[in-house]
Image (tube, rainbow, N blue to C red):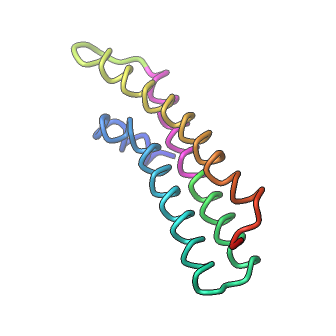
Amino acid sequence: MRPLIRFVQHFPLLAAVAAMIVWAIHFLLVYAGVGLACARGYSTTAVLLWLATTTVLALLVALAITLAGFDRARRPETPPHGQRRRFLARLSALLGGLALIAIVLTALPMLLVPPCR
């Protein structure tokens, strides 16, 4: 957790959107991976394993980013950049929560509808 907190301290703008970048990568990996697996004739079990693995990894990374943002937002900041840093930490935490929801909603249709149909 400490490296993420240092990351948020040194790169606050990138940290604010990092969870959304994780969601975009997850979106790409899930849909492209399942499409390629179905085109090449892999089994449904392999496709679902790919989906579950990428989803769990993306959820863990987005959760870590969210928690690091919340932790940074609770710390007192000193002027002159304190309000800006706290705002970006809160933004990082809120976008992390949004990314968690987006990751689940991205994977949900693939889990409900059998792949490769």
Viewer-nearest residue: 34 or 63: 34
**Magenta region includes residue 69:** yes
Q: Residue at x 60, y 71 (%)?
A: 34
Report the predominant secondary structure element of the magenta stretch.
helix
Q: Residue at x 47, y 44 (%)?
A: 19
Q: Quadrant of the C terminus?
A: bottom right
Indicate the position of residue 65 as horizontal and vertical percent values. 49, 42
Quadrant of residue 8 in the image? top left
Q: Residue at x 75, y 77 (%)?
A: 44
Left or right: residue 46 compared with residue 99: right
Tag count: 0
Viewer-nearest residue: 41 or 14: 41
Q: Residue at x 69, y 64 (%)?
A: 52
Viewer-nearest residue: 65 or 103: 103
- Vertical side of 64 occupied by 78: above or below: above
- Vertical side of 45 occupied by 82: above or below: above
Q: Which residues are magenta?
A: 60-75
Indicate the position of residue 26 as horizontal and vertical percent values. 52, 57
